Image (cartoon, rainbow, N blue to C red):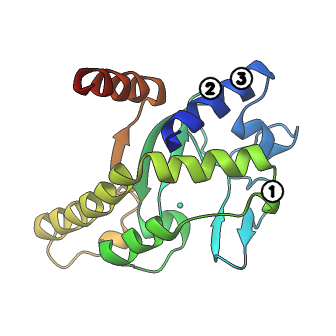
Amino acid sequence: MTAHDELVGLLEALERAGTSAMALARAGRTPAPWTLYPDEYGIYDRRTRCQFYYHSHAGVEHTVHVVAISMAPSGWPQALFTVNLWAVGDAYASPEELTRHARAFRLRERRGPASLVRVINLVFQAFRPEIEWLQEEKERALAGYRSAHPGADPFEDRSLEILSRAAIDVRERGRRLLAGLGASA
């Protein structure tokens, strides 16, 4: 079974159970913009040094930062994106470093609700090409900004928040993968 197939099965099982990855992260608490869930440290795995957390922005965008996952109200991932350093307080890392981190990202399931941790791990596995592409696209956006605004610091420009974005459709990806396998069989 591929990571994608397992991700679809898990998201569908959560849906049938009347819950979602975001609901598991919030542990029944009402979402409040900029509040980190499950707590201020998220879920951190000391052995792998990987971490994730969920938060929502004011307005309609719901996100859960190598990459952020935008979640639809249905509880399914709808986009992957990267943000400017000021938005998350990060230090600069090159696209190559971020790609290495993305490839190594893996949380042990006992670090939080198993289904939630599994969803995050599977998104990193199933959409690794998109996550890696986003790192390069982020660097291109920064270079474009520097070219258009000589001497300005793109990391301090509050109007420059999302640096790269890729819409994803987990179910559609599955249909395309299935169609591709059927055509080659």
* Relative horizontal placement of residue 165, taking residue 143 as reference (left or right): right
Give how far apart the Cα atoms at labels 1 and 2 are.
Answer: 22 Å
Q: Residue at x 76, y 39 (%)?
A: 31
Kind of residue sitting beneath label 3: Glu
Q: Where residue 107 sits: x, y (%)?
A: 67, 63
Mark 3 neighbour density, 10 Å: few (under 14) some (14–19) many (20 or more):
some
Give how far apart the Cα atoms at labels 2 and 3 are.
Answer: 11 Å
* Relative horizontal placement of residue 129, taking residue 139 as reference (left or right): right
Q: Is residue 22 above or below residue 148?
A: above
Q: Nearer the viewer, residue 43 or 34?
A: 43
Q: Nearer the viewer, residue 169 or 181?
A: 181
Kind of residue sitting beneath label 1: Gly
Of the two numbered discs 2 and 3 on the same chain, state the one appearing first in sequence: 3
Q: Where residue 118 sits: x, y (%)?
A: 67, 48
Does the CB distance between marks 3 and 1 fall below 8 Å?
no
Does the CB distance between marks 2 and 3 fall below 8 Å?
no
Q: Which residue is mark 1?
A: 112
Mark 2 neighbour density, 10 Å: few (under 14) some (14–19) many (20 or more):
few
Of the two numbered discs 1 and 2 on the same chain, state the one appearing first in sequence: 2
Q: Is residue 175 above or below residue 86?
A: above
Kind of residue sitting beneath label 2: Pro
Q: Is residue 60 visible?
A: no
Q: Which residue is mark 3?
A: 15
Q: Residue at x 80, y 21 (%)?
A: 18
